[in-house]
Amino acid sequence: MEELILEPYTVNQSWRLVGDADKWENLISEFMETLAHRCAETGKGMIGHIKALALFPDGGYLRVSVVSPILPAGVEGSVPTDCSELMLTLNVIVYGLGRDVLEQLTRETADHLTKKWKGGMTIKAL
Amino acid sequence: MHLLLFSGFLGSGKTSLIIPLSDAAVQSGHRVAIIVNEIGEMGIDNQLMRQLKLNVWELVAGCICCTLSGDLIATLQTLDLDYALDLVIVEASGAADPNSILRLLPYYKGRSLTSVRTVTVVDPLRLSILIEVMTPLITSQIQCADLIIVSKNDLATSEQIESARRSAHEINPTARIVSAAARAHLEAELISELFPWKN
């Protein structure tokens, strides 16, 4: 079999959400599951691991992990109450897709979900 | 100093097993460090382990079986010199070939390692497809294991678990094979199996 390229994409994102502060687990899971779908839809990507750690300003964390476009995200941790923002470190490890493609898919998926959830996301320096 | 090398493909559940194992070792009065290797530019698992107050050392943006091999040896020597550890747990990146890591150990010049044990974690939800697509890597990870843990037994069907056990046994007939849940809880029996000392 042809050797698949492996160019992990890592990004730090600051997410904001107003009014649905108890929905972080759903939002981040949907973000990562959708991203896994988008990677698989290209027809070239094989998911290695899409994983993230979300840290909340007042303590608490969520660790979210996706290994396949057909399996739900695994989530560990807990969300503090009434928390409107979080800092997310995301590692997108997908065989067969270059870093530029992963960056684009990640950005598009985040844009789509921030509109859907009426939130906001900005990229922070690593 | 004992060394426990955790290998296994990306997302197989290595971190979820290492965290409660390390916790249990600390609770039983042992000094433990974890070396976490991730291929992303910034680590996720090391941040999580720090949140949980574990003694973690990170090697990121490469693989300890090749590009970061020197860093692994240097970290082991630092740990040996500066800390009187009972156990070092090395979590290899999911893309690492553990055979290459084991071949590096003769370059480590600290106190001799009391024991070296390789544990390979396999994901029963994906093993069959991974054996097809990533044959050399997955085969090597399973072949060099002393102990194989079929993870996610709370998520997989009994057929998937049995199939994973059978495949792993075909590749490595001498390794002991056990199964464990995906969540951060380890059975006492498995902890005893993994610890290099008697409780």
Image (spheres, coloured by chain):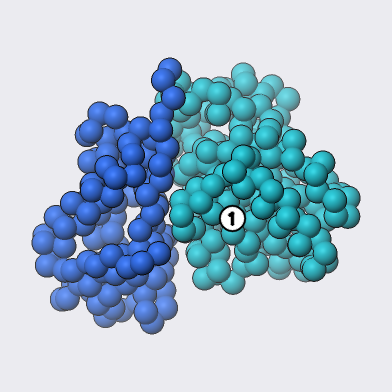
Residue A96 x %, y % = 35, 32
Above or below residue A10? Residue A126 is below
Give the color of chain A as drawn: blue
Q: How many marks?
A: 1
Residue B199 x %, y % = 81, 57
Q: Which quadrant of the rendered structure holds the N terminus of chain B?
A: bottom right
> Which residue is at a point 28% across and 49% down the rendered structure image?
A103
Q: Residues within 10 Å of mark 1 (few under 14, many from 20)?
A: many
> Which residue is at a point 41% across and 29% down the rendered structure image?
A4
- Chain identifier of the residue bearing label 1 in the image: B
Q: Quadrant of residue A31?
A: bottom left
Above or below residue A23? Residue B188 is above
> Which residue is at a point 80% across and 52% down the rendered structure image?
B2
Q: Relative to the observer, which residue lies in front, B190 or B196?
A: B196
Q: Quadrant of residue B125?
A: top left
> Which residue is at a point 79% across and 68% down the rendered structure image?
B83
Above or below residue B117? Residue B127 is above
SS at mark 1 in the image: strand
Residue B81 x %, y % = 82, 64
Q: Relative to the observer, which residue lies in front, B138 or A29?
A: B138
Residue A71 is at least partly visible in this image? no
Tell me which chain appears cyan. Answer: B
Left or right side of B38 for A53: left
Under mark 1, the amino acid is Leu
Mark 1 = which residue? B59
Residue B11 is at least partly visible in this image? yes
Residue B33 x %, y % = 70, 62
Left or right side of A11 for B19: right
Left or right side of A112 for B131: right
